[in-house]
Image (cartoon, rainbow, N blue to C red):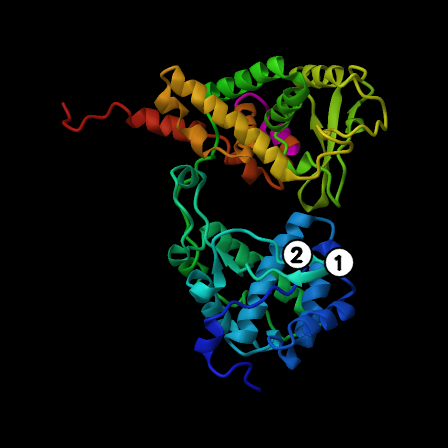
Amino acid sequence: MTSISNTLSALLSQSPSPMFDNLQYLAGPLKEVDAIFARQIKQTPKCGKEDLYHCLTFLQSYNGSQATFNSYRREVERLVQWSWFVQEKTLPELRRLDIEEYLEFCQHPPLSWIGTKQVARFKNSQGQRIINPDWRPFVSQITKVETQLGQRPDTKHFKLSQKSLQAVFSILSTFFNYLLQEDYGELNPVALIRQKSKYLQTHAYKEPIRRISNLQWDFVLETVEMNAAENPKQHERSLFIMNCLFAMYLRISELVADGRSTPTMGDFRADIDNNWWLQVTGKGNKVRMITVSDDMLAALKRYRTHLGLSPLPHVSESTPMISKIKGTGPVTSTRQIRFIVQDCFDQAYQRMREQGLKEEALELKAATVHWLRHTGISEDVKHRPKEHVRDDAGHASMATTDRYIDTEMRERHASAKHKKIKPE
C-alpha cells in the first residue's frame, strides 16, 4: 500500500482536517466524496474513496436525529482519520489488533489532535463552507465546577471518559456490522475484542443518579417564581420550562424545534376521559405519550394565560410550545434552554448561601439541565408504579428505571449507620 505520509511523527505533529459537515450541508454520497477530495486532496488517500462513500451512506441513514448523527459522525470520522493517517489502512483491512491499537490511541492521542473547546467543523465564508482550522478530533474538557473555579482545559491532561469509551465500542460495532451488510469487509473487528473489561470499568454497585435534593429544588422553583413575578415577560417562560423539565422529565432536546420535530401547544391533548397527555418525539425518533399531572396542567394554564391564549390548547394548535422572547417562532437552540436553567441554578445557589445553607447549596454548582429529569424521575418512582414512570420517561427497558430506585441503598446504609468501631 502506498505510504500516505513520509513519517508517522510528521503525521502526528499536525491535526487532520474535518471530513463530514453538518447534515443540512451534505450532498449525496458520491458528490460529497468528490467534494471532500477536492477540499483535502493533500490529506486524502486515493484508496479512500470507497471508505468515504460507505461512511457517508451510513451516517446519512441517521438523518432523523441530529444528536445521533453527531455522535456517529464523531466516532466514524476519528476512526477513518486514524486508519488512514496512522495505520495507513482502509476500513476493510482493519483487524482486531488494529482496533485495540486504536482504543489505546483514543486514550492517549497526540497533543496536535486535541483541542480545548468545542468548535464547528466548518464555517461560512463568502457563501462557501470552509474548514475551521481550530477544529480537533478530540477535545479536552473540564467539569462545570472546575470552570467556575477558574480552571481551563489542558491538552496535556486529556482523558477519555468511560462513557466515551462505551460509545466507541457501541457505535463502531454498529458501523462495522453495517459494512458487513454492504459486503464492504469480511468481519467486525470490534466484536472480536473479547476482553472489553481491559478498557471498560465495571462496578459492583449502581452508580448514583445525579440529581438535586428536594430542598435545592424548592429554592430553584421559588427563585424562578420570584423572577416571574418581577419580570413576567422574561421569566414566565423560564418557569414553564423548569416545570416541564421536572414534572414531565423531558430531555432538553424534546423542548426545542429541530429537523426531527417542532413541539407545539397542540401536542398537549385530552383523551375521552379528559385526562391530559403530552406527545413528544424523543431519542431514536420514538414518539411517546407523557401523563400531564394536575399541577403540570395548572402550570400550562398559567403560561398560556400569560401569553394571552386560552387556558388550554385546542386540537392541532400550532403555537410553539417554547416561543422566542424576541422575534417569532419556536426556540431552536438547546443552548438557550441550558442558559435559562443555569441562571436559575446560579441564583438559587446564591440565595441558599445567603441564608446560611452553604453545604446544602453545593450540588447546585455542579448541577446541569439533565439533573432535573433525573430528579423528577427519582421522586416519582417512590410513589408511582415503576412501569408508569418507565413509559413516561421513555426508557427502553425497566433496568434503566430501576437505577432510580434507591430504597436498597438507603436500607443498606441505615443498617450500618450505627455500627461501632469499638464493639460493646
Identity of the residue drawn at 44% across and 36% down: 208
Q: Check disc 1 and report the residue beneath it.
A: 127
- Magenta span has 385? yes
Where disc 2 sits, the SS reads strand
| Residue plotted at (69% across, 70% down) | 36
Q: Is residue 179 left or right of residue 197?
A: right
* Between 324 and 53, the one nearer to me in the picture: 324
Image side of residue 132 versus residue 269, left or right: left
Would residue 172 be seen by someone viewing this image from the given angle? no
Residues marked 1 and 2 touching at CB (< 8 Å)? no
Residue situated furthest top in the rendering: 229
Which residue appears at 48% of the width and 20% of the height? 214
Q: Which residue is mark 2?
A: 123
For residue 69, above or below residue 35: above
Amino acid carrying label 1: it is Gly
Residue at position x 48%, y 68% in the image: 102
Q: Secondary structure at mark 1?
A: loop
